[in-house]
Image (cartoon, rainbow, N blue to C red):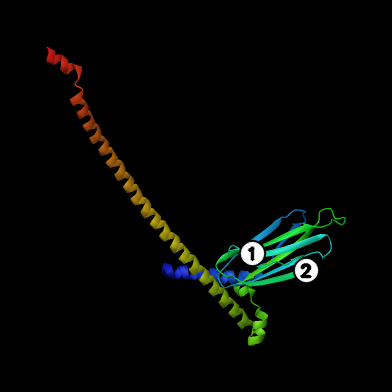
Amino acid sequence: MGPSSTLSLKTILGLLSLLFVLPFTSALKFDLPATTHKTERCIRNFVSNGQLVVVTAIVSGQRGDGQVVNMVIKDALGNEHGRPRDIAGETRQTFMAPADTAFDVCFENKLVSRQGIQNPSRHVELDVDIGADARDWSSIQAQEKLKPVETDLRRMEELVAEIVNEMEYLRAREQKLRDTNESTNERVKWFAVGTMGMLVGLGVWQVIYLRAYFRYAASFYPSPFSSALHSV
């Protein structure tokens, strides 16, 4: 078995292990302390162009308990994809990625009144589904009358396609960075050659100039030894 076959086998095994691990991943859970000043806690994710993103947040507490939890979803391009206010319970935001970019899901907990609580805070459970994970496979199974195994295979097929597209994107990006690196090295090489040529040319010009200067000075200002010899 050649190296390419071994690499392909390793890649396939890695993709299959990733697909088996993905269904068991849990949501991100954290506590959000209430403050009187603006303090945001952001979670960043990366998304490809045209991918579906579903952000689900479950916030503990209830409205009117002296804490106001706000959420905002914004990407690196300056687009805003949702700004729910005063969250309590479950809230869900859905959007399509406009480009290959990163997006942030930010939370803030404003303290309105303490109501006898020493250190008020809210518990947040955040789940971000992207691409095939964001689709409602239960409704797809019901609409297309698929068996559970067929639904799982369909989901796995889309996940593999997304991973392949991501690998192609990384390969193209690596190729672009390599081309930029080679172009930069080429420019630096010719810049060094040009600098050395200028230094050599400047050195030669200085030698020629100094020789001409001393010859000119010797013709107009004879040395005292030569004057003494002429007088004798």
**Disc number placed over residue 74 in the picture, else none:** 1
- The answer, for residue 10, to whether it is visible in the render is no
Mark toward the start of the polypeptide (2 vs 1) = 1
Q: Where is residue 48 in the image (x, y as percent from the top left)?
A: 56, 69
Left/right of residue 159 with respect to residue 119 in the rendered view? left
Q: Mark 2 points at which residue?
A: 89
Residue 55 drawn at (x, y percent): 67, 69
- Asked which quadrant contains residue 40, the reply is bottom right
Q: Which residue is at 63% across, 73% downward?
A: 133
Amino acid, disc 1: Lys
Check the picture and name the quadrant holding the N terminus.
Answer: bottom left
Q: Where is residue 219 shown, x and y percent of the image?
A: 18, 26
Q: How far apart are marks 2 and 1 (CA)?
A: 21 Å
- Residue drawn at x 56%, y 77% is 157
Of badges 2 and 1, nearer the viewer stands: 1
The structure residue drawn at horizontal position 46% and vertical position 68%, both measured from the top left corner, is 6
For label 1, the crowd category at 10 Å Cα-Cα, with few meaning under 14, some 14 to 19 and many 20 or more, is: some
